[in-house]
Each structure stands twice: as C-alpha cells, then as structure tokens.
Amino acid sequence: MRILIKNCSIITMIEPDDVYSVGQIEIEGDRIAYAGTVRDTDVKFDKVIDGSGMVALPGLINSHTHSSMSLMRGYGDDTALMKWLKERIWPVEEGLTGEDVYWGAMLSIAEMLRSGTTAFADMYFFMEEVARAVSETGIRADLSIGMVSVSGDWKERIQNCKSFFSEWNGEAEGRINVSLGPHAPYTCVPDFLALVSDLAGELGAKIHIHLAETLDEVRQIKENYGKTPIEYARDAGLFEHRVLGAHCVHLTDDDMRIMKEYGVNAVHNPQSNMKLASGIAPVQKMLDLGINVALGTDSSCSNNNLDMISEMKSAALLQKVGLMDAEALPAVKAIKMATVNGAKALGIDDSVGMLKAGMKADLVLVDMKKPHLYPQHDLISNTVYAAGGADVAYTLVDGKVLLDDGELTGIDEERLYFEVDKSLKRLFNR
Ligand SMILES: [Zn+2]
C-alpha cells in the first residue's frame, strides 16, 4: 500500500524546531519513503490524504499505563491512594475476568488511536488478552505482566512471564514487545527482584517498574532496607537491564547520578502525580543531567484519560510552576518526551519516534482548522499548549490508517460499548 499525505505541515522531531510549514509525506508499505518539502513524484498512490491545514507529527508514545483500568475510570476519585486502592480498586480487580481485561484494553486502544497515541507500555494481568487486543487493532505495544511478591508462588509467576514472553514477544508483525513487570519496590522483596533480574538476563527483556512514586514509598524502603527506592532497585540487579522506571518523583541527587550511570529511563506521569498528590518529578533536572525521560498517562483511573497531547501540556506547566521558571520544559521538549524519548525508553528508536525516510510510518495528523488552533505562529506551541487529543484526525501505525478522518477503521465502537457495558454490569452490579 502506497499512501501520500499532501500539503501538510510537518514536525519531524529529527532536530528541535525541524518543522516544514507545507510539506508532504510518502509511505510505502509500513515505512516512510519521504517526509519533506512538496515535490513531484511519478509514484502511483493507493490512497491520498489531503493534509491541508493539518500538522503531521510522530505517533505519540504513552510509556506507562494500565490500559484495562479504563473500566474503573471515575470510580472513587478524590480519595487518598491507599484508601482508594483498598476500598475501590482492589475489590473490583478481584472480580475481573480475561474478557473484562480484553474489553478494557480495547476501550483504551480506541481512545489512544483517537487521540494520536501509536504505541503504549502496559502493565497489568491477563496480559495475553491485552496482547490479543493489540494484535487485532494494529497499535504498537510493550506489554508486561504486573507482579508482586507478597503472596503466591514465585516460581509459577516467573514461569508465566517466560511463557508470555515466548508466545508474544515480536508478534503481531513485530508490533508487540514483552517486558517484565515487577510492580514496585514496596510490593517486591529483593529475592524476588533477583529472580526477575535473572529472567531479564536470560530473555534479554526490559523491566517495567514503578519507582519512587510517593514519599510513603521512600520512607518505607528507607525504614526496611536503609536505601532509597533507586538504590534498592540497583542493588537487586534490575539496572543491569533496560529499565522503564515509572514516576521517579522523589529522587536524591545521588539517585539521579545512579540513573544516569545505568541508563535508567524515567517515565513522567504528570497528571497522575498531580491527581494523587504524589509530588513534582525533577524532570528538568533529569533532562539536564542527560537522563532519558519519557512521558506516560498512568491508568485512566488516576488521570482520567489517555490523552497524550494534554499530558505534554501538563508536563510543561508542572515543571514551570514547580520551579517558578516560565522557561522550564519548553513545548518542544515536551513533544520530545512523548516521541523520541518514548521510543528510546521502549528500545524502538531505530524505527519510530521521528518522521524521516526509512522509519516506520507511525504518525498522526492534527487538524488545525479550528478556532482554538488559529493563528499558527508556532506549530509546536499550538500542538502542545492549544490542541487536545480530540483534534487528531488521522492516526497511522506501520503504514496502516487506523483513524481515518476521525473514524476508527478497525474497531467497531457500537460493539465496543455494548461489550464494555456487559463487563460493567457484572463488575459493578449495575
Ligand atoms: Zn502505574
């Protein structure tokens, strides 16, 4: 399939401010054949998209979420974290079936494709159901089974990860990668993390873990082990592997030095950190030190949506107000976190994250022909500060048009709502 997107503006993300005000993108199969100024070509295209008034940017990468928790969106908001988990979330999760997880993931994938996300890193259970949803819908994903060590059989847990890895890693035309998901320092003891680390070495897998999210966590790890969560994860051997460290809110200077030394990828989740009153991650400082910081939404329970465009805005604003510095985290760095840095964190930066020839055709078109997006003095500023996920008109993954002029091509939304309602009825007795 050959696709031409003509007369669009392009934010390539190859270099900061590398923007074409009018350009075109040519796609051949799953890859970008050309992205640049308007040119004549003899190629016969199967599909032509008129990108007039639209801006193309690399598909957004949500580097930390729990997609199936969409089923609990808005259930018990404005409650302290532990109370909310104990009284609301965990009782519902106990009743979840594989089918619920599948439809919860489907709901999130529909939302992500509609708002310009082309890849996501997910941690939850019944992950084979999420893998099935990813495979069927055409989105890209990095999937990990969430694991805790407090109860159950560790060996069985490790074996499940191994089976999930061998069944799904590299599947769905290479769109699925499998990582290992030990939940957090406060839910996984050192001996268990050592087993996870060994398995990561054996499989060559990444590790996706929550790190230093709250002051409570820092206090607890300090009390029990005399270490910070970052030191704890390092000493358990996790940093010998590629790590996606979700949150990284409460860090010492030494923690950041360790993260830099081991190449730990931080994933910033500003809206979740604000909603749960976790704190303000030192994003500007980490970036200045050369730590790779990606962007995520966390689940739609603590956000409450998966809109990566509004997440970029929140990331920029939160640094500014936290540092009392209007120049902190400018818009272009926020886009970089959601594209280039996300690709790097997920280990797929050789094929996605920028719009240039040879890269996979994972891209989105934001429709700027709207009152809130006029005028266009600065396309990057408009995209981060004025646009929202609902302004995305086209989303392509692997050269396939998954959102076509506002219509999802691979998901039947009527069926989706029907199936989600069925799950909700059972889970919430409605
Ligand atoms: Zn999380």
Image: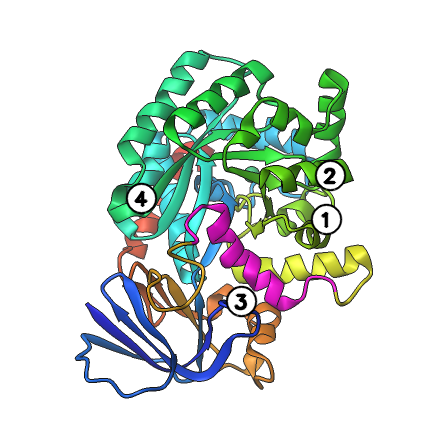
Q: Residue at x 49, y 67 (%)?
A: 14
Identify the image quadrant of the N terminus: bottom left
Q: CA distance from mark 1 to mark 2?
A: 8 Å
Which quarter of the figure has residue 253?
top right
Q: Residue at x 73, y 51 (%)?
A: 285
Depth check: give the residue in front, 224 or 308. Answer: 224
Magenta stretch holds residue 44: no
Is 250 displayed left or right of 428 in the figure?
A: right
Q: State the separation of the CA atoms marked 4 and 1.
A: 35 Å
Counting other residues with Cα less than 10 Å from the Cα at mark 4, is it few (<14), some (14-19), or many (20 or more)? many
- What residue type is disc 3 on? Gly
Q: Earlier in the sequence, mark 3 or mark 1?
A: 1
| Residue position for label 4 | 133
- Asked whether the residues under the numbered discs 1 and 2 touch, taking CB atoms below 8 Å apart as contact, a structural biologist would say yes
Position of 22 with respect to 407 (left or right) is right
Residue 89, compared with residue 301, is above or below; it is above
Query: The disc labelled 2 sits on which kind of residue?
Result: Leu
Residue under numbered circle 1: 282
CB atoms of marks 4 and 3 within 8 Å:
no
Mark 3 and mark 1: span between their CA atoms?
25 Å
Residue 100 in percent (x, y) is at: 37, 36
Please give the residue where the numbered disc 3 appears in the rendered image.
388
Please state the extent of the stretch shown in magenta in the rendering: 328-349
